[in-house]
Image (spheres, rainbow, N blue to C red):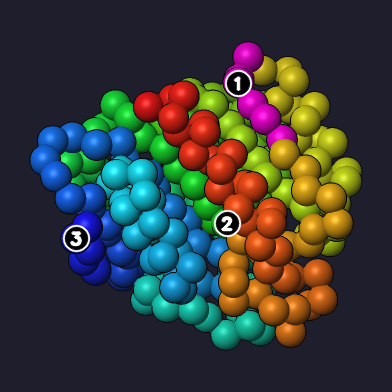
Amino acid sequence: MQTRTVSYEADGLECIGHLAVPDGDGKRPAILVSHEGGGFDEHARNTANRIATELGYVAFALDYFGGGKPIAGDQVMGRIVGLMQAPQRIRALANAGLTQMLTEERADATRVGAIGFCFGGTMSLELGRSGADVKAIVGFHSGLSNPSPGDEQHFVGKVVVCVGDADPLIPTEQRAAFEAEMRATTVDWQLHLFGGVGHSFTNPAADGTRMAAINYHEPSAKRSWKVMVDLFAETF
C-alpha cells in the first residue's frame, strides 16, 4: 500500500485529505471516507488504509472542516449545525472529495462507494441524495435526518446504515423517518440496529469522556465492518 497526504480546495477551505492506494496495477473500486464530527483524525486515516490493505481498493479520506486535523470539542456542534443549515455546502464538500479521489489514476469511476462516521455518515448520505454516481453508501452511527425531503429519490446505488439503538444522537423518531423515506423509493436499502450500543461505536478513541453514550463497542465495530465488506463484495 502507498499513502500520501493530499491538499485540495473545497467550499473555500484548504482541505487536507489522506489517499491510500493498494499494491498492484490496474483500476480498482474507490471508496470515499468521511470522518466523524470531531474533525479529521486517525480513525479516518486508519479506515482508508484498512480498505486499501484488506480489500484492495483505492480509498480517500476527505476533510470537510479544513486543516486536516481534529477540532476542539466546544466547536464541534457549532460547525455541524452550521452545515446542517446549509445542506448544499455538505454536498459541495462531499462532491469535492469525490472529485479529488477520482483524480487518482487507479480509481475506477464506475465502481465508487462512500462511507462515513457520525456526521461523515450524514455527508455520505447527502452525497447520495445529490445524485452522485455512487454505487454503495454506508453510514456508521450516522445522522439520518434529511434536510431536503424528496431528494432521497436521487440515490443511484445501495444504501446501508449501521446505528446503535442506545445512540442519543440518533433517536427512534429519526430512524423511523428515515425508514419511511426509504420505503417510498426504489432504493436497495438496509438499516442495521445494534442493541445496547451508543454513538461512535466504531472508533477506538471514543472512551465515554465526552458523553457516556459516545463509546467504542468492539463487537459492533466488527459486525458493521463485515456488513460493509459484504455490501462492497456484492456491488463491486
Residue to which mark 3 is pinned: 2
**What's the residue type where badge 1 is placed?**
Asp
| Mark toward the start of the polypeptide (2 vs 3) | 3
What x and y, as percent, mark residue 44?
45, 64
In the image, what residue type sits under mark 2?
Phe
Q: Amino acid under label 3?
A: Gln
Magenta span includes 21: no
Please tell me whether residue 190 belongs to the stretch shown in magenta: yes
Q: CA distance from mark 1 to mark 2?
A: 20 Å
Q: Are marks 2 and 3 in contact (CB under 8 Å)?
A: no
Give whichever of discs 3 and 1 has the lower sequence position.
3
The image quadrant of residue 9 is: bottom left
Q: Residue under circle 2?
A: 117
Numbered tag placed on residue 159 in the rendering: none
Q: Secondary structure at mark 3?
A: strand
Residue farthest top in this picture: 186
Q: Quadrant of residue 98?
A: top left
Viewer-proximal residue among 57 and 60: 57
Residue at numbered disc 1: 188
What range is drawn magenta here? 186-191
Specify which label sits upstream in the sequence, 1 or 2.
Answer: 2
Q: Secondary structure at mark 2?
A: strand
Bin the neighbour count of mark 1 within 10 Å (Cα to Cα): few under 14, some 14-19, many 20 and up: some
Using the image, determine if residue 183 lies above or below residue 54.
Answer: above
In this picture, residue 196 sits left or right of residue 82: right
User: In which quadrant of the rendered image does the C terminus lie?
Assistant: top left
Residue density around tag 3, few if under 14, some if 14–19, many if 20 or more, within 10 Å: few
Q: Nearer the viewer, mark 3 or mark 1?
A: 3
Relative image position of residue 11 (x, y in whole percent): 38, 59
Q: Is residue 208 above or below residue 11?
A: below
